[in-house]
Every structure is written in C-alpha cells, then in structure tokens.
Amino acid sequence: MEKLIIGNHVSFKKDTQFKGSVLEELSYGGNAFMFYTGAPQNTARAEIIDSLTLEGMQIMKENGMDLRNVIVHAPYIINPANTANLDFSINFLRQEIDRVEKLGVTKLVLHPGSHVNLGEEVAIHNIINTLNACILSDTKVIVCLETMAGKGSEMGKTFKELKQIIDGVTYKEKVMVCLDTCHLNDAGYDLTKFDEILEEFDKVIGIEKIGCVHINDSKNDKGAHKDRHENFGLGTIGFDTLINIIYNDKLKDVPKILETPYIGETDDSKNRLFPPYKFEIEMIRNKKFNPNLLEDIRNYYK
C-alpha cells in the first residue's frame, strides 16, 4: 500500500526555523509541509541557522519524513509578470532560491504574477525573462509555477499559459507546476471530472511536471475568479471530490499540502485563531467527513 503524502502550511520562526517547522508538522500528524522563509509580504529575512536545519532533518529522519516532500513558497511580493519592479522581483527570487538551496529543500512554489494592464503576451515574456535570470545551469531548486484563479490580471489561470511560460525557459527541466484545487475551481475547471483535468494537463504540459498539489476547498462557485480558500469539505468543491483528488493514483508520489484557513473562536471578540490541520488530516486519512470539524477544533485548542 502506498503511503499517503499529506501535510500543510507551517510557520518558519526566527528562533526555531526549520526544526520548528518539522515539529509543528509532526504535531498535526502530517509527513509533508510547506513554509515561507520569511513574511510573504515583505523582504525581512533572518539568516538561515544551519544547526537548526540539521536538527530538523534529523527529526524528519527519525519520523520517516522525506525531504523531497518539503516545499518552500515564494513571497507574494515577487511579481514576475509586471515590468514595474521587475529588477526587484528577479533579485528577490534569486535570494529566495539561494535560501531554499541552503535549507536543502528542492522545490519552490511561485505565483506567476499579475500583468496589471500590460496584457498577457507581455506578462508571459516578463515571467520567462525572470525565470531565465534566476534558474541557471547550476540551480538545484525546482521552481513550481502555481495554477491561479484568474483574479484581476493574474497569470497561470490555464494550462496553456503555463505551457507557454515553461516552453520559454532555458532550463525547463527545473520548472514544474503546483496544482491548487481552490484556484482550479475558481479558474473554471470542474474538479468533479479530475481525471479529465489530468488528461488535459498531460496533453498540454505533461503529468510528470506536477510537483505538488495545494489542497483547498473554495468559498466560491466554479469560475468565480476570486481565490478564497475554505476548510476541507466545507466549501463548494466538497469532501468527496477533494478525497478523490488526493487519492488519485496518478498523483500518489506527489506531496499534497493543505492551505485551509485557521478557525476563529465563536466569540470573535477574543480574536483567537486555531490551525485546522490535525483534524483535516485525520479526516483525509479516514476518508470520512467530520460534520463537527469546526467545533472539534475549537474544543481541542481551548
């Protein structure tokens, strides 16, 4: 029986870094995880502490976790699609790739960005130029372009767009794709026909190019182009459809990462938020929907 590769987004704190990320994931019962190396909305970055990285790797080894199932997410402030601040995007992406390499992680998820009235053709040109400036012959990191919802002028909303980008990259063997279930739904893909989606992806890009999958339910109807994540089984995609995606045999070796929202108190004045991942991963492993999901999460963290 194949081992399910499932995990979620975790924190990467200045004082505990990679070791802290590993321990957080273990507390949720996952065997894969994703993190930012710093805040996604700014350039503040703590220096990588090698001893914490090595301690984290040792803990992973002791718990049967594979480093190939660890993902770093590039910060949102990198916008490869727009000419404005393109030098910043290139320089900061280079720095992030260096940090990922220093951590020993092999995959970096990147949003293709928004063209902001420049048009899609210019955007694709900019994204290709950015990737070619950052992915060199000796780059060890695989950049995974994320499928996007098509909000505003977002790029990456169709497989065709991603294919155009990949085709323009010199070292295209170092570029893969991150499927996001919420984004696919909001972009207009019918996830109840996921096998057909995979067939289309295979024809356009090649199924071997799927580097990871973000598992998120959606608050929106199919084709809404809004990108609002919902907790597992509580959105418009639904529990059964998401379970079928996770357990699709063609993706058995691909890490699946939850990016579902934290759960708030019933009394909003307390302003406390709780991670849902321990309970969502349990549902996924059991393949059984928990109708008391939100209540169980709140009770657990009281």
Image (cartoon, rainbow, N blue to C red):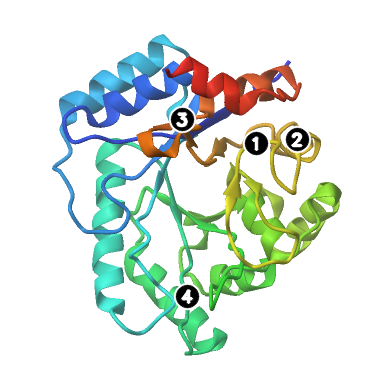
Q: Is residue 52 left or right of residue 211?
A: left
Measured as percent of width and height from the top left, residue 92 is found at 25, 63
The amino acid marked with disc number 1 is Phe
Give how far apart the Cα atoms at labels 1 and 3 are. 12 Å
Q: Which residue is mark 4?
A: 114
Q: Amino acid at mark 3?
A: Pro
Q: Secondary structure at mark 3?
A: loop
Distance between the alpha carbons at the discs numbered 4 and 1: 27 Å
Q: Position of residue 41 (x, y in %)?
A: 30, 58
Viewer-side label of 2, 4: 2
- Among numbered discs 3 and 4, the one appearing first in the sequence: 4
Q: Could you give the CA–CA distance between mark 3 and mark 4, rounded to whole angstroms?
A: 29 Å
In percent of the image, x 59 and y 60: which residue is there? 147
**What distance separates the C-alpha of mark 2 from that of mark 4?**
31 Å
At 29% from the left and 70% from the top, the residue drawn is 90
Q: Are marks 4 and 1 in contact (CB under 8 Å)?
A: no
Q: Is residue 235 above or below residue 88?
A: above
The quadrant the C terminus occupies is: top left
Q: Secondary structure at mark 1?
A: loop
Cβ–Cβ below 8 Å for labels 1 and 2? yes
Of pointers 2 and 4, the one earlier in the residue sequence = 4
Q: Which residue lies under the disc numbered 2?
A: 239
Tell how many labels. 4
Q: Amino acid at mark 2?
A: Phe
Give the residue at mark 1: 232
**Spatial CA span between label 2 and label 3:** 18 Å
Circle 3 sits on which residue?
Answer: 275
Which of the two labelled residues, at mark 4 and mark 1, occupies the earlier sequence position?
4
Asked whether, in this view, residue 164 is left or right of residue 142, the answer is right
